Image (spheres, helix red, strand yellow):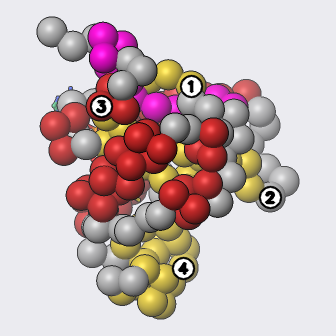
Amino acid sequence: MSNIQWMYGHEPKSLPDEWKEKIRTMFFNETGEEYTYDSIDQLLIPEWSGNMLLIDQDNYPAADSLHGLLWALPHGLDGVRIAAFVLDAEHQSCGWGGKAWDHLVEISRSKEKISIQLEVKAENTRAQGFYRMRGLEIVRHLENYYKSGHGYEMKGSIKE
Ligand SMILES: CC(C)(COP(=O)(O)OP(=O)(O)OC[C@H]1O[C@@H](n2cnc3c(N)ncnc32)[C@H](O)[C@@H]1OP(=O)(O)O)[C@@H](O)C(=O)NCCC(=O)NCCS
């Protein structure tokens, strides 16, 4: 029996190297994106309620206790941008992503934010479906944004 929960995380740059390695592997396996320790540090995600880690409490603080993350940051005056959102394959399609999304919307509204935006690979139609179901739409095509090709910027209102 695992004891998995979303928890608030620390700034990415303060995470131990074993955790960064686990994050790198998760990003690569699930999105094909290659991160380095430096590019993880440079995401500049603050310690706030939009910095969430999916953790197996029974295995914490081992790096293997990490099963997913949602890293968002305030964007402009009244927006929120998701810089990274990934779950390991085992924990996808179980409602964990939806749960983190709902929490992000709730806390963003409480901070007077009115929109959420993010970048997604053009080929990642599953994630696009997830975001579309949650009111986001493609607002911009990002040519050669990713090493492997094009991306989209998606954005949606979170006004009640
Ligand atoms: C995109 C991602 C973060 C979504 O998180 P998730 O936990 O898989 O999503 P959920 O399980 O909450 O919802 C996905 C679907 O699973 C189904 N689902 C939800 N709860 C479920 C449950 N309890 N049991 C079974 N299926 C469920 C629903 O059909 C849901 O579809 P919906 O989006 O139409 O609501 C995750 O799939 C992921 O990490 N993908 C790979 C990396 C990636 O593409 N990241 C995005 C980069 S921009």
Asked if residue 64 is positioned above or below residue 142 in the image, the reply reads above
Name which residue type carries label 1.
Answer: Tyr
Percent coordinates x, y for residue 1 in the rendering: 15, 9
Q: Which residues are magenta?
A: 48-59
Q: Quadrant of residue 106?
A: top right
Name which residue type carries label 3.
Answer: Asp
For the residue pair 109 and 18, the one nearer the viewer reads as 18
Q: Return the disc, 2 or 3, that comes first in the chain's sequence.
A: 3
- Can residue 70 be seen here? The reply is no
Disc 2 target residue: 76
Query: Residue placed at 74% from the left, 55% from the top?
Result: 75
Query: Residue placed at 68% from the left, 52% from the top?
Result: 44
What is the CA distance from the residue labelled 4 to the residue labelled 1? 31 Å
SS for callout 2: loop
SS for callout 4: strand
Disc 4 target residue: 140
Labels 2 and 3 touching (C-beta < 8 A): no
Does residue 119 appear left or right of residue 98 in this picture?
Answer: right
Disc 1 target residue: 8
SS for callout 3: helix
Q: Quadrant of residue 22?
A: top left
Mark 4 vs mark 3, foreground winner is: 3
Mark 4 and ligand 1: say if the CB distance to the nearest ligand atom is below 8 Å.
Answer: no
SS for callout 1: strand
Q: Residues within 10 Å of mark 3 (few under 14, many from 20)?
A: some
Taking the view exactly as shown, the residue that stands out farthest to the bottom is 143
Query: Residue placed at 63% from the left, 39% from the top?
Result: 14
Name which residue type carries label 4.
Answer: Arg
Q: Residues within 10 Å of mark 1 (few under 14, many from 20)?
A: some
Percent coordinates x, y for residue 51 in the rendering: 58, 36
Tell me, for residue 64, which label it has, or none. Answer: 3
